[in-house]
Image: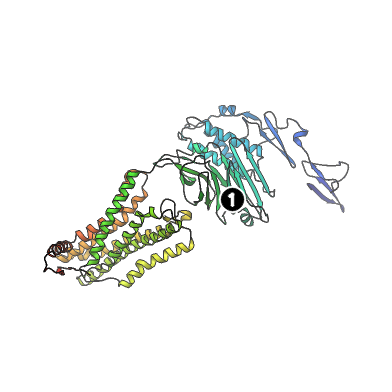
Amino acid sequence: MPTLCTNSNAAHSCTCLFGYLLTSPDAIASPLNPCLDIDECANTPGLCGLHSVCTNAPGTFHCSCVEGYFSSTGVLWETDFTVCESVDDVLAAIVPPEGQSKEMYFLNQMNQQLMENPDIVLPEGKVSGAGTISAQQASTGQGWSGAGKDGGESGSVVLKISVLLVNALVDPSQGRVNKTIHTPELDISLQVMEANSTDTSSLSARGHTMDINLKALARNNNGTASAVFLTVSGMESLLGASFLQTENHTEMLSDVITATLPKINHTQLSEPVNFTMSHKRDRGMEYENGTKGRHWSVNGCWVVFSDENYTVCSCSHLSTFALIMQTGEDNPFLEWVNRMCVIVGLVFFALAILTFLLCSWNPKINNTARLHLCLCLFLSHLLLLLDYTYLTHKLVCSIMAGLLHFLVVASFLWMLLEALQLYLLVQRLSRIQVIQREGLQKKYLFLIGYGIPLVIVGVSAAVKRDGYGGSKVCWLKPEQYFTWAVLGPVCTVLALNWILFCVTIWSLRPTLANMKSDVSQSKDTRLIIFKILAQFVILGCTWVLGLFQSTMVFKYLFIVLNSQQGTFLYIVHCLFNKEVRDEYRKWLGCSSSSSTPDSMPRSSTSGFFTCGII
């Protein structure tokens, strides 16, 4: 009961709090004579002034302006001082700084006032009115300098204002609360839940829903937690063109929705939040979320289910979300170029593998790493080429994605082992001035080249069992940064490779300086360094082009260079080798001479290279 009790001279008395009145004024406050709320709005007509609405509340009242009017003191209301003014009159009186429109200045002032009063509690009418006015000003402002032709800056400010306004709906002194606000511009759903509640937390706004475990959050926030889910009309146009910086034409497939956790200290989610978003159009789409700077991001969310009517997305954080539709069609010529280039690359991979298998190299060179590097790259390119055959089979796609993950990581590790073999070879050269076969034993090479990738894939699959697969390509799903299961090892290997190359070249500096240019040993050493360095540039640097896919030129460069890794490896390690070229000519001679009855296959040697059928 809203009473105040005091003790005086061994007696006590109870009175009603401000804003309340006793049922029977002649008796003291008691359970039989409770304090009742005073309806100030009914008792005092015109209490808030012209063009205003008075809303009664327990122990108090709230004033807000009618549609088309805004309070002279902003979102704060000062009794007996604040008046409601026409929005047009408010804008006409504004003198904005140079280079800023009146509408933008108005929005920034509202945003600043809300930020300076984070603990303010506002009535629904105030939130609805201020939110509606901000959305209208963002959508009707013309020629805003600094905002961009599409009003991207104004859209961002309106979203900030909307979040601050709905945060002000939460009164920490209240218990469980469910509030909804529906206007043509705003659709807001607020829920405050206690830790011991038996209800589920599901909020809806304009046909979209958010399912969140508020009870788990309440346990970490003094027994209560609040969540707000809202949409603001017109945001899909304001935040569309300036944020969707893609080559294909893109547009919003859904409303822009915002989810936030107001006035709670611990906002770490114990489990992902599910958003069910209705489609505006029946066309293909991609899910993107969150604004960072001037772009939409795809981090932290993944598609759980999608059909022609709605999409369910699961997110590990709360932010502003939308479904993005790409209306550009696939480029058949680009796909044809990619397929043809991959096929050519596979042919040269096969030639290199056959050369490494059927020919015995210079005994100074350990060929194991190079052979298995080509094998891993050949199989990974082949899986990508044939992914359309198993893309629609979920289980097979997941298995192939795991296998592709293994092969990619193994490829980079074999490249690292090749660089390590070179380093050990150079160390041997520096000590005794004679190149001999030096390096790790095969069992250690296989343990590192295939053992480490197997552990990485096994741990990744155990941590995220459904992390492999996809709807467009069988690969690692981007949810919760799972792609770092391959990016981490690859970046580490590339960094180690650069270090090994630098150390190797530095170690060779005094050796090469002491050698005469016409000494075969010097030529041999320089050729080895050139081949391995060229291999690293071919295999490592071509992947960098994958980061610049915003233009068609970089797309074609990436496809051509990355698909021709086998071609480059074959040219550098086979065609650039004089002994190999000599043996190719002898092989051709063997093939032509085998047409005579008395010809027999034979092996021959030339310099440091021996070739024969095994």
Residue 608 point in image, percent of width and height: 17, 68
Residue at image x 48%, y 37%? 152
Residue 144 point in image, percent of width and height: 48, 32
Residue 84 in the image: above or below residue 409? above
Residue at image x 54%, y 38%? 158
Nearer to the camera, 393 or 414: 393
Residue 143 in the image: above or below residue 498? above
Number of disc labels: 1
Question: To which quarter of the image does residue 446 belong?
Answer: bottom left
Type of the residue with mark 1: Asp
Residue at image x 55%, y 41%? 160
Label 1: which secondary element: strand
Residue 512 in the image: above or below residue 552? below
Residue beneath disc 1:
211
- Check the picture and name the quadrant holding the C terminus: bottom left
Residue 7 point in image, percent of width and height: 83, 52
Of all residues, the one furthest to the right in this rendering is 26
One can see residue 564 in this view = no
Look at the image and name its color scheme: rainbow
One can see residue 209 in this view = yes
Nearer to the camera, 457 or 319: 457
Nearer to the camera, 110 or 284: 284
Q: Is residue 186 left or right of residue 368?
A: right
Q: Is residue 147 left or right of residue 579?
A: right
Of all residues, the one furthest to the front in this rendering is 597
Residue 577 point in image, percent of width and height: 18, 61
Question: To which quarter of the image does residue 136 belong?
Answer: top right
Residue at image x 32%, y 56%? 540
